[in-house]
Image: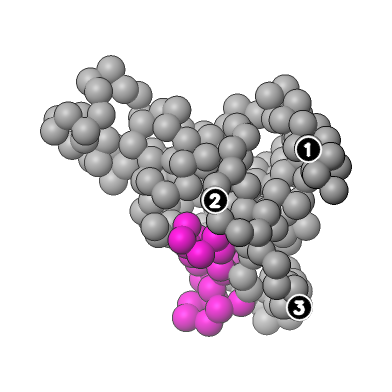
Amino acid sequence: MIKRTMIQYLKFAVIALAFSSCAQTGDNDLDPIVEAEVPQTPLLEQVRANNYSAKNLEILIDKSDYTLQVYHKDSLLITYPCVFGFDAVSDKMKEGDGATPEGEFGIRSMYPHKSWEYFIWIDYPNAESWSRFRKRKADGTIESSATIGGEVGIHGVPEGTDDMIANRTNWTLGCISLTNKHITDLYKSINSSTKIKIIP
């Protein structure tokens, strides 16, 4: 089992280094998700059945719970497990810190991705991100030469590595990663008017 897991991990690492501008391997000390996944109606099925507008959908990403939830107004529609940057705890302060940014974001673009199935590009850095960045530079929290970074999004995993999500392996440079099944469901259910909130 250990040998098999290592082979899968090495396969993933090679793919990540070859193709990703945002991925990096890394894991944390949390236990893997062991409970069976609760059956849920796919988001796309709910959206179509109820004729929900994407502008009324909101995404809530909880870094502490390792979850991405989609709401229609105040009603929870679905919960997906997810993982983050290799620094899964901190708010993103600068380029290269491996942290996933916190705050309220819009969607800049959405497109299929050759390595991660789909990519939902959030609008980090936005005005609030820049304000925090400048303040941190001014008070010396980060060095004056630091850059803010970008290209943060929600995406899948390399083919055959969905277990990275169940194992809570924080492997990106700051993006949010879902299984390929879940990113496909999410991608096909929302559009650029959907809002995203990321909390610690």
Name the residue: 55% across, 78% down.
76
Report the residue at 36% width, 31% height from top: 94
Disc 1 element: helix
Magenta residues (range): 54-77
90 to 72, vertically: above or below = above
Q: Main secondary structure of the magenta part?
A: strand
What's the amino acid at mark 2?
Answer: Asp
Res 126 seen here: no
Residue drawn where x is 39% and y is 57% of the image: 200
| Three-letter code, disc 3 | Pro
> Is 193 included in the stretch rendered in magenta?
no
Residue 174 at x, y percent in the picture: 50, 40
Q: Is residue 66 magenta?
A: yes
Rendered position, 32 above or below 160: below
Mark positioned earlier in the residue sequence (2 or 1):
1
Inspect this view and state whether residue 27 appears.
Answer: yes
- Circle 3 sits in a helix, a strand or a loop, which is it? loop
Q: Which sits earlier in the primary sequence, circle 3 or circle 2?
A: 2
Report x, y in % for residue 131. Answer: 23, 40
Residue pictured at 47% horizontal, 81% vertical: 74
Report the residue marked by disc 1: 6
Q: Is residue 93 above or below residue 66?
A: above
The x, y position of residue 28, in whole percent, is 55, 47
Q: Please identify the quarter of the rendering in which residue 145 is found.
A: top left
Left or right of 69 in this view: 7: right
Residue 125 in the figure: left or right of residue 189 = left
**The label number, if any, that marks residue 29 in the structure image:** 2
Check whether the beta carbons of the residues at disc 2 and disc 1 lie within 8 A of each other: no
Q: Amino acid at mark 1?
A: Met
Cα–Cα gap, marks 2 and 1: 17 Å
Q: Is residue 78 above or below residue 159?
A: below
